[in-house]
Image: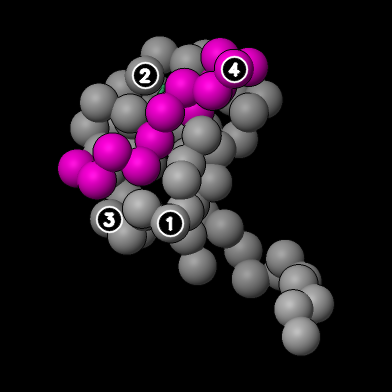
Amino acid sequence: MGYKVNKEKCIGCGSCASICPLGAIKIGADGKAEIDKSKCNNCGKCKEICPMGAIEEEEEAEEKSDN
Ligand code: SF4
């Protein structure tokens, strides 16, 4: 569960970074938004404001093999 940035769609406008109440989003070196998952609480405001529809909900499909 969480949000991720679709870098193909993001134009680096910074709207999401401005609206995030937790300061979890910044524009990275590639000029695209990045979400710091350790700060994000999944409020979804970035997804609402993004003009490009670049913020997407993460699917559970991502398989991780911790432990
Ligand atoms: Fe990229 Fe959307 Fe954030 Fe703008 S609001 S920087 S297009 S993810």
Q: Amino acid at mark 2?
A: Gly
Residue 30 vs residue 53, the one in the foreground? 30
Residue at (76%, 72%) from the top-left corner?
64
**How far is the residue under mark 1 from the one under mark 3?**
13 Å
Q: Quadrant of ligand 1?
A: top left
Element under disc 1: loop
Q: Residues within 10 Å of mark 4 (few under 14, many from 20)?
A: few
Q: Amino acid at mark 4?
A: Ala
Give the magenta range.
21-33
Q: Quadrant of residue 14?
A: top left
Mark 4: secondary structure: loop
If the image is split into quadrants, where does the C terminus sit? bottom right
Residue that carries the numbered disc 1 in the rendered image: 38
Distance from mark 4 CB to nearest ligand 1 atom below 8 Å: no
Q: Mark 2 to mark 4: distance in Å?
A: 13 Å
- Residue 61 to residue 15: above or below: below
Pointer 3 residue? 43
Query: Which residue is labeled 2 in the image?
Result: 14
Tell me the amino acid under the disc marked 3.
Cys
Query: What's the mark number on residue 29?
Result: 4
Secondary element under disc 3, as helix, strand or loop, is loop
* Relative image position of residue 2 (x, y in whole percent): 47, 60
